[in-house]
Amino acid sequence: SRLDHLADGKGSNDGERLKKLSNFQISCVKHALSFPSVKYVTYSTCSIHREENEAVIASVLKDCPDFDVKYALSNWSRRGLDDDGLSSEQSDALVRVDPKEDMTNGFFVALLARKGMSVVSHKKKKMRERRKRRRKQNSSEKIAKKPKQS
């Protein structure tokens, strides 16, 4: 199974395995958030276990105060579970897919954003940048197409 190398297999029970996996996931997410220019990180698992999902996010937010969760997949009704380390607003921002309810294996999604970043403002900024590049490209094409006067 995935990441089995983190559990030695000798007397490991599911609780120990989940703890090792969640510690590994916490370190990966914290590493991703450590880059100064990172604005957003999406954390997603194919797991239904709170230890690999909400508990990881709660731990990461505790250790990375410059980040918070943003509401992800607004059309999805099932949200994150309550966790001691998350506010109800933070839990509501998380996405959970349930195997029984959604006929999948189940998964989890969290959108982490540097504080002060708005998903909407980021999208608007990207759109402005694209429009600016297109205008510049279009004006360059017009200049290139202009007939030379003799």
Image (tube, rainbow, N blue to C red):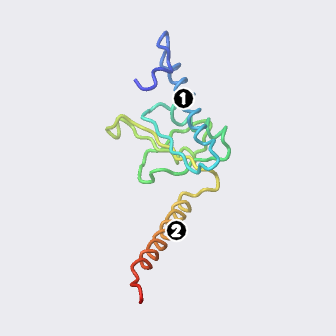
Amino acid carrying mark 1 in the image:
Ser
User: Is label 2 in a helix, a strand or a loop?
Assistant: helix
Which residue position holds label 2?
128
Q: Is residue 101 above or below residue 76?
A: above
* Quadrant in the picture for the C terminus: bottom left
User: Is label 1 in a helix, a strand or a loop?
Assistant: helix
| Residue 22: assigned label | 1
Instruction: Pick whichever, 80 or 149, lies toward us.
Output: 149
Q: Residues within 10 Å of mark 1 (few under 14, many from 20)?
A: many
Instruction: Pick whichever, 102 or 67, lies toward us.
Output: 67
State the image coordinates of residue 148 (x, y, percent, origin top left): 41, 85
- Are circles 1 and 2 on residues that touch, CB within 8 Å? no
State which quadrant residue 137 falls in. Answer: bottom left
Amino acid carrying mark 2 in the image:
Arg
Q: Residue at x 48, y 10 (%)?
A: 10
**Mark 1, mark 2: which one is toward the viewer?**
2
Residue furthest front as drawn: 150
State the image coordinates of residue 38 (x, y, percent, origin top left): 59, 48
Q: CA distance from mark 1 to mark 2?
A: 39 Å
State the image coordinates of residue 32 (x, y, percent, origin top left): 58, 40
Q: Is residue 131 above or below residue 31?
A: below
Q: Is residue 130 left or right of residue 36?
A: left
Q: Residues within 10 Å of mark 2 (few under 14, many from 20)?
A: few
